[in-house]
Image (cartoon, grey):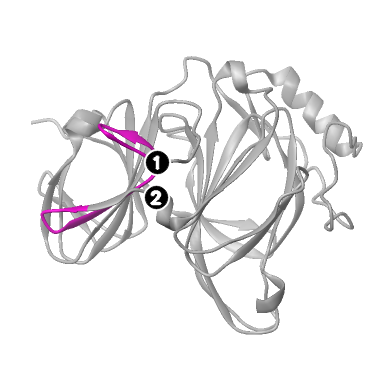
């Protein structure tokens, strides 16, 4: 029988500010999984009293960002005036639309002590008709995220919808982002609840799919979401994500995503010129910014 695992990708290192992350998407072999365009695995890292996360003001267009922490805290500020700390189990959901600027930093009260940081940062594409929408931001508390247990398996629907369950995260297209945890070996068949394209990221532990074991920090892309069956080999944490892919190709340059390259070019010029009508400054964090990198489509 032909395997349902279409692609196996290993996490690769990348830099965000002064912090190392593991990049999961995009890869040359796979540019997106459903509407999911970009996934960074931050940490796990122990930052000393003199080390802090500092990602200065930087812009986005044409996408939504989802930040989800396992450990630690990040203080988010944006050009809409939002200023909020995100903690483990909570969700920051920011829709950039036609343009937004934000920064991510270690909260002030943690900057002079040792701390841990561990989480995921995700970019999700917008439908073509919403790529130029007004930017918006939502913070969702951990108690608002649907969670349940079935047959020794713990589930959390961080974003999107499956069957009768729906996350309050205000997504813009059919998708899902699900956390699955087991403490003992379990067989899981969730394919009848999924749709579109599906990826699996094994955060901790291992899974067995069609008699083969896959380990920590591996991203698996399924050929058919409806055939999503696997076994966990004990204490395991994994994430399933995906949904309906867009018909149009999405182009990416740096922090910009759009189906129209001319809009990307205009965003590049606006940020390079520090056009504050296109990209307003962030209240209380406007003394520095991340400069535009050298042009390179990917």
In the rendered view, would you say 19 is above or below 123?
below
Which residue is label 1 attached to? Answer: 167
Residue 156 in percent (x, y) is at 32, 51
Residue situated furthest front in the rendering:
143
In the rendered view, would you say 66 is above or below 202?
above
Sequence order check, earlier mark of 1 and 2: 2
Give the extent of the magenta segment. 149-167
Q: Is residue 267 left or right of residue 89?
A: right
Residue 207 in percent (x, y) is at 20, 54
Q: Residues within 10 Å of mark 1 (few under 14, many from 20)?
A: many
Q: Residues within 10 Å of mark 2 (few under 14, many from 20)?
A: some
Tell me which corner region of the image, top left, top right, bottom left or bottom right, holds residue 287: bottom right
Which residue is label 2 attached to? Answer: 145
Residue 223 vs residue 34, the one in the foreground: 34
Quarter in which the C terminus is drawn = top right
How far apart are the alpha carbons under marks 1 and 2?
Answer: 6 Å
Prevailing secondary structure of the magenta residues: strand
């Amino acid at each position: 029988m032909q395997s349902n695992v279409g692609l196996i990708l290993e996490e690769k290192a990348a830099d965000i500010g002064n912090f190392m992350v593991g990049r999961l998407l995009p890869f040359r072999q796979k540019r997106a999984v459903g509407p999911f365009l970009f996934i960074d695995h931050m940490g796990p890292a122990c930052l000393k009293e003199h080390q802090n996360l500092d990602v200065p003001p930087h812009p986005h267009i044409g996408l939504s960002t989802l930040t989800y922490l396992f450990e630690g805290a990040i203080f988010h500020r944006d050009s809409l005036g939002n200023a909020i700390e995100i903690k483990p189990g909570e969700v920051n959901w920011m829709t950039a639309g036609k343009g937004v600027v934000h920064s991510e930093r270690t909260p002030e009260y943690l900057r002079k002590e040792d701390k841990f940081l561990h989480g995921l940062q995700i970019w999700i594409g917008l439908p073509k008709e919403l790529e130029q929408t007004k930017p918006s931001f939502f913070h969702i508390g951990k108690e608002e995220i649907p969670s349940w247990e079935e047959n020794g398996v713990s589930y959390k629907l961080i974003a999107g919808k499956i069957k009768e369950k729906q996350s309050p995260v205000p997504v813009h297209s059919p998708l899902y982002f699900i956390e699955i945890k087991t403490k003992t070996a379990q067989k899981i068949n969730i394919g009848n609840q999924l749709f579109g394209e599906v990826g699996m990221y094994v955060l901790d532990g291992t899974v067995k799919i069609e008699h083969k074991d896959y380990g920590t920090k591996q991203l698996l892309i399924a050929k058919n979401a409806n055939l999503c069956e696997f076994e966990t080999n004990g204490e395991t944490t994994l994430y399933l994500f995906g949904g309906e892919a867009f018909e149009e190709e999405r182009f990416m340059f740096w922090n910009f995503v759009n189906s129209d390259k001319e809009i990307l070019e205009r965003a590049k010029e606006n940020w390079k010129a520090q056009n504050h009508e296109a990209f307003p400054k962030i209240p209380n964090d406007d003394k520095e910014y991340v400069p535009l990198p050298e042009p390179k489509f990917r």
